[in-house]
Image (cartoon, rainbow, N blue to C red):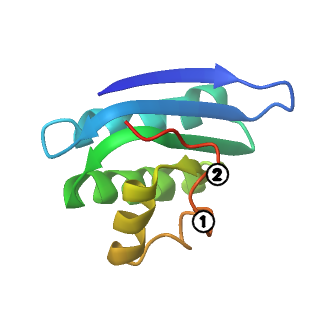
Amino acid sequence: MSVTVNVMMDGSTVVSVRGEIDHGTATTLRQDLVAAATQRRPSVLRVDLGLVTFLDSAAVGAIVGAQREAGAEGVRLVIHRASPFVLRQLRIAGVDQLLGAPAEPDPDHIPF
């Protein structure tokens, strides 16, 4: 898993995640998301999961946990893009709407 943080022209922050997010990397993801929220304090923290190839329940829990922590700091964390696999996993977990995930996969998504 790799994580990149970019500040956009509109003041939002985009955290782009690539690769597999599982039990071994979920804690790191949560820490990275919370750090981007608390250090930069954007009004919106967009999480780009368009290049995530796998995520498990620990990863979903990490994202939801990070959203709660960010929200406590006044930062709205939302899923900005999601691969079809990720979107399906978020729906199965019942957190897609909670995380503001798009209703449909990104139409520009390029399969791996």
Please tell me whether residue 44 is drawn above or below residue 86 in the rendered image.
Answer: above
> Which residue is farthest left?
24
- Where is residue 67 drawn, in percent x and y? 49, 55
Q: Would you say residue 30 is visible in this rendering?
A: no
- Where is residue 53 drawn, in percent x and y? 31, 41
For label 2, the SS is loop
Calculate the distance from the C-alpha at mark 2 to the C-alpha at mark 1.
8 Å
- Comparing 67 with 111, the one in front is 111
Q: Which residue is mark 1?
A: 104
Which numbered dot is residue 107?
A: 2
Amino acid of disc 1: Glu
- Comparing 85 with 59, the one in front is 85
- Where is residue 70 drawn, in percent x and y? 54, 49
Q: Nearer the viewer, mark 2 or mark 1?
A: 2
Q: Quadrant of the N terminus?
A: top left
Residue in view at x 81 percent, y 31 percent: 11
Residues at circles 2 and 1 in contact by the CB criterion of under 8 Å: yes
Crowd rating for badge 1 (residues with CA inside 10 Å; few <14, some 14–19, many 20+): few
Residue in view at x 31 percent, y 32 percent: 19
Crowd rating for badge 2 (residues with CA inside 10 Å; few <14, some 14–19, many 20+): few
Residue in view at x 34 percent, y 65 percent: 89
Amino acid of disc 2: Pro
Q: As drawn, is 45 to the left or to the right of 30?
A: right
